[in-house]
Image (cartoon, rainbow, N blue to C red):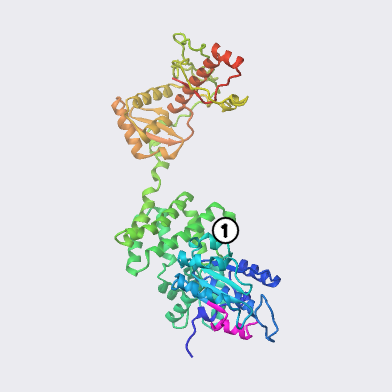
């Protein structure tokens, strides 16, 4: 007797044997039990999930005669009557399967529809099953539309497709559609375990996990791979043999790569990639395994309380995954996951897939943050003890609101924005005179846009409800740094990240040959930006070495510029609102100023 492959031997013969499609089974079973039957069904889904199987079970349910020959429509076909046995063996005259992939023309469809005028010969219903229906031509679809919409009461259509988007909407609207889902690896693993126990084939759990994962949601693929693994292992399924057959990468290599990437060890990354090349292991499989591990690591990092849901405690690799989740920062985990995911698509573009794999892995090292940024201030403090001084506590002060004269009259000469000097602290030295932060020049010159929309009352107050920026306590170092940065910006001596570093930093201390700056964001502390700023300062005669620390910034050129801009904006708004012409228009015509349309110049 010839061998029957597992995919055919264990094809479900009734709804109870269907695996992973409970939503379809429940709907069809209830419809059969209550005999609320549709005349056309459309089953969609990827390959090997049970579309043809469901069609045959449905045909048996419609035509089952029961063991005693007195049965009717049922959700549990007996499997022993003549109709059930003939449908299983493919000899039932009233059940016709048409492969639309090879019979896609209008002639084949018309030949099938010609049989619709004849009543069933042996069964209760005629069932026309058209597989891969999306392959039919437009003419063939049009030929079957009328019969599909109003078939005889004894005729049922069952259509199956892996690509429902290619089926015309005129056909979709005439069918009851069911989407068969890809099966979860856990579902496939459970079914494979049952099949191999029945076949009395010894198998290691990890070997079955590899097969379940390689099936990618298709039960037929899983059983076909199991057949191949049994032959490869001479009747036994072991993890090493299955891994070698599938060409998958040992998780040990994956963990080693992630460990090396977390440590920034490029040498180990390159050596591991070369080892994968020598062993003939798939580069695409390596990236796939890495994405699986990184996904589990990301879940652990984001939701530590769901560790049990993220990892399988029976998996020996779970402990190593949990250790790496602590070892690698969460942002690097997300970056590496994205790189691996996109790198799989780039392997085909590389001249050598292993060279492409190496470049994908080394890309993370290229984007890793500079490790020296966390310790830059340590050697500076050792070389310059003067930087250890404590900054005096900051007394809260506020900037006075500068009121402008009514437009269009220009502001009086010498009208400037001044900063209120805070009172001297007890026991502290008197402060030196402080230069003003920035002049409120041309506060009354305003650009006013044409008013086209009348906002509701209170809109102006809502638009100006933002809290003003925190005040600045001026200092000699702050005034000097603001003036120096302003000169560099106006001279266009700095740009891009270097300009942002200068504007967002606070000068904490100055020594003869070293200055200490403080920034709040670590992304500004880049070696290239610091060196470019040193070069620009040298053009102004400040040949110093810069050191940068991370901390709270209370006085920076950017904050001073923002305060000056806010003061000019307030002065401009008050100038417009105090203008007699504007006041008369608001009083006489109920005019409103559109929020956000006033800009000082």
The magenta stretch spans which residues?
78-96
**Residue 208, image x, y percentages:** 50, 73
In the image, is 513 to the left or to the right of 200?
left
In the image, is 571 to the left or to the right of 344?
right
**Residue 435, image x, y percentages:** 43, 16
- Residue drawn at point x = 52 percent, y = 15 percent: 575
Q: Nearer the viewer, residue 370 or 107?
A: 107
Instruction: Answer yes or no: is residue 357 visible.
Output: no
On screen, residue 219 above or below 466? below
**Residue 370, image x, y percentages:** 39, 44
**Residue 503, image x, y percentages:** 41, 30
In the image, is 165 to the left or to the right of 78?
left
Mark 1: few/some/many CA within 10 Å (<14, 14-19, 20+): some
On screen, residue 551 above or below 32? above
In the image, is 106 to the left or to the right of 173?
left
Q: Nearer the viewer, residue 568 or 593?
A: 593
- Residue drawn at point x = 55 percent, y = 15 percent: 582
Q: Which residue is mark 1?
A: 307
Hey, which quadrant is residue 253 in on the image? bottom left
């Amino acid at each position: 007797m010839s061998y029957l492959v597992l995919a055919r031997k264990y094809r479900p013969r009734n709804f109870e044997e269907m695996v992973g499609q409970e939503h379809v089974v429940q709907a069809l079973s209830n419809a059969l039990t209550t005999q609320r039957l549709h005349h056309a069904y459309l089953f969609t889904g990827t390959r090997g999930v049970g579309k043809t199987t469901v069609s045959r079970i449905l045909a048996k349910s419609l035509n089952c005669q029961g063991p005693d020959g007195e049965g009717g429509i049922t959700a549990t076909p007996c499997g022993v009557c003549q109709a059930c046995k003939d449908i299983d063996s493919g000899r039932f005259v009233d059940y016709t399967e048409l492969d639309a992939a090879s019979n896609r023309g209008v002639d084949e469809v018309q030949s099938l529809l010609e049989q619709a005028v004849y009543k069933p010969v042996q069964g209760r219903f005629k069932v026309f099953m058209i597989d891969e229906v999306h392959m039919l031509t437009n003419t063939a679809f049009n030929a079957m539309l009328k019969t599909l919409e109003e078939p005889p009461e004894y005729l049922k259509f069952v259509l199956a497709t892996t690509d429902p988007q290619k089926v015309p909407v005129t056909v979709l609207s005439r069918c009851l559609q069911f989407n068969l889902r890809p099966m979860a690896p856990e579902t496939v693993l459970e079914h494979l375990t049952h099949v191999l126990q029945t076949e009395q084939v010894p198998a290691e759990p990890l070997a079955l996990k590899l097969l379940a994962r390689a099936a990618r949601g298709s039960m037929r693929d899983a059983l076909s791979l199991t057949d191949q693994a049994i032959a490869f292992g001479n009747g036994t399924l072991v993890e090493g043999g299955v891994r070698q057959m599938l060409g998958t990468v040992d998780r040990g290599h994956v963990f080693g790569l992630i460990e090396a990437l977390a440590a920034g060890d490029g040498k180990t990354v390159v050596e591991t990639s070369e080892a994968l090349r020598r062993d003939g292991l798939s580069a695409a499989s390596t990236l796939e395994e890495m994405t699986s591990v990184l996904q589990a690591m990301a879940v652990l990092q984001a939701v530590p309380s769901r560790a049990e849901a993220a990892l399988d405690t029976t998996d020996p690799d779970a402990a190593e995954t949990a250790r790496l989740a602590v070892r690698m920062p969460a942002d690097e985990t997300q970056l590496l996951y994205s790189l691996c995911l996109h790198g799989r698509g780039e392997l085909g573009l590389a001249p050598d897939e292993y060279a492409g794999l190496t470049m994908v892995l080394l890309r993370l090292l290229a984007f890793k943050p500079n490790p020296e940024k966390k310790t830059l201030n340590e050697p500076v403090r050792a070389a310059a003890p003067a930087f250890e001084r404590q900054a005096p506590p900051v007394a809260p002060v506020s900037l006075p609101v500068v009121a402008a004269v009514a437009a269009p009259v220009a502001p009086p000469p010498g009208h400037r924005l001044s900063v209120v000097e805070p009172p001297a602290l007890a026991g502290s030295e008197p402060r030196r005179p402080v230069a003003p932060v920035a002049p409120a020049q041309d506060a009354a010159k305003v650009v006013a846009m044409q008013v086209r929309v009348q906002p509701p009352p209170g809109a102006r107050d809502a638009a100006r409800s933002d809290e003003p920026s925190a005040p600045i306590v001026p200092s000699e170092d702050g005034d000097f740094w603001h003036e120096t940065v302003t000169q560099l910006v106006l001279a266009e001596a700095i740009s891009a990240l270097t300009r942002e570093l200068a504007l967002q930093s606070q000068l904490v201390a100055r020594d003869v040959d070293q200055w200490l700056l403080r920034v709040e964001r670590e992304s500004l502390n880049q070696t290239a930006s610091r060196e470019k700023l040193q070069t620009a300062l040298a053009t102004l005669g400040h040949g110093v070495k810069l050191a940068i620390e991370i901390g709270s910034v209370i006085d920076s050129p950017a904050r001073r510029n923002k305060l000056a801009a806010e003061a000019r904006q307030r002065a401009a708004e008050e100038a417009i609102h105090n203008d007699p012409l504007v006041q008369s228009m608001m009083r006489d015509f109920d005019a409103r100023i559109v929020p956000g349309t006033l800009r000082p110049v």
